[in-house]
């Protein structure tokens, strides 16, 4: 073996002399081998791209089905919550009726529910005003 400085390749041991007929044949063989390797690389890239596309399609289909199922379950949960709140309101009217009469109980329950709605609307309005302020400057920081 020969000692070569770092970063330099050692010349091949059995390299033919430049300008000979063997040099042309060796160059053609190397070029043919390079072309074959590039063809294999292109085929592998095509196979990878097709596999990736199939994977993404499958993932999107699964995500769509899962999102649809989650949405249906969420809607059912909200329906059950609505029914529970109605039952709570009816129960409160029934519980208060002996104390203040039926109409008084209805007035108290409806009044409390409307106060809750008003509090929620005011809080949502404050959040909306904050959002309006955030986007009023078109993304520019006010200094």
Image (tube, rainbow, N blue to C red):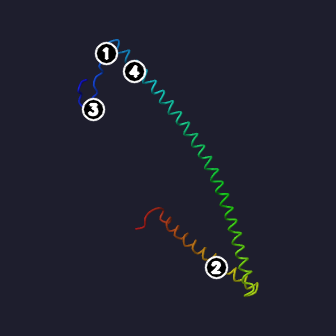
Which residue lies most toward the right here? Answer: 102
Mark 1: secondary structure: loop
**Left or right: 135 in relation to 69:** left
Q: Which residue is mark 2?
A: 115
Q: Which mark is residue 7?
A: 3
Q: Quadrant of the C terminus?
A: bottom left
Q: Which residue is mark 4?
A: 30
Residue drawn 73% across the image and 80% down it? 93
Q: Which mark is residue 98?
A: none
Q: Which picture quadrant has residue 126?
A: bottom right
Mark 2: secondary structure: helix
Mark 4: secondary structure: helix
**Left or right: 11 in relation to 72:** left
Mark 3: secondary structure: loop
In this view, the residue in front, 124 or 135, is 124
User: Disc count in the image?
Assistant: 4
Residue drawn 60% across the image and 76% down it? 119
- Distance from label 2 to label 4 (Cα)? 85 Å
**Location of residue 113 in the rendering, given as x and y in whole percent from the top left corner:** 67, 77
In this view, the residue in front, 96 or 36, is 96
Q: Earlier in the sequence, mark 2 or mark 4?
A: 4
Q: Quadrant of the N terminus?
A: top left
Residue drawn 67% across the image and 65% down it? 78
**Location of residue 75 in the rendering, given as x and y in whole percent from the top left corner:** 67, 61
Q: Which picture quadrant has residue 50?
A: top right
Residue drawn 41% across the image and 18% down it? 29
Q: Which residue is mark 1?
A: 16
Q: Earlier in the sequence, mark 1 or mark 3?
A: 3
Q: Earlier in the sequence, mark 3 or mark 2?
A: 3
**Location of residue 8 in the rendering, given as x and y in whole percent from the top left corner:** 27, 29
Q: Earlier in the sequence, mark 3 or mark 4?
A: 3
Label 1 neighbourhood size at 10 Å, few (<14), some (14-19), many (20+)?
few
């Amino acid at each position: 073996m020969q000692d070569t400085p770092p970063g330099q390749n050692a010349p091949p041991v059995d390299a033919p002399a430049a300008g000979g007929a063997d040099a042309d044949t060796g160059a053609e063989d190397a070029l043919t081998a390079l072309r074959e390797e590039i063809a294999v690389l292109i085929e592998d890239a095509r196979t990878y791209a097709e596999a990736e596309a199939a994977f993404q399609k499958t993932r999107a289909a699964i995500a769509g089905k899962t999102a649809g199922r989650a949405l249906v379950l969420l809607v059912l949960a909200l329906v059950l919550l609505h029914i529970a709140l109605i039952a709570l309101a009816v129960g409160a009217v029934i519980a208060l009726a002996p104390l203040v009469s039926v109409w008084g109980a209805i007035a108290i329950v409806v009044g409390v529910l409307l106060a809750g709605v008003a509090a929620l609307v005011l809080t949502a309005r404050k959040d909306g005003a904050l959002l309006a302020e955030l986007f009023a400057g078109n993304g520019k920081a006010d200094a």
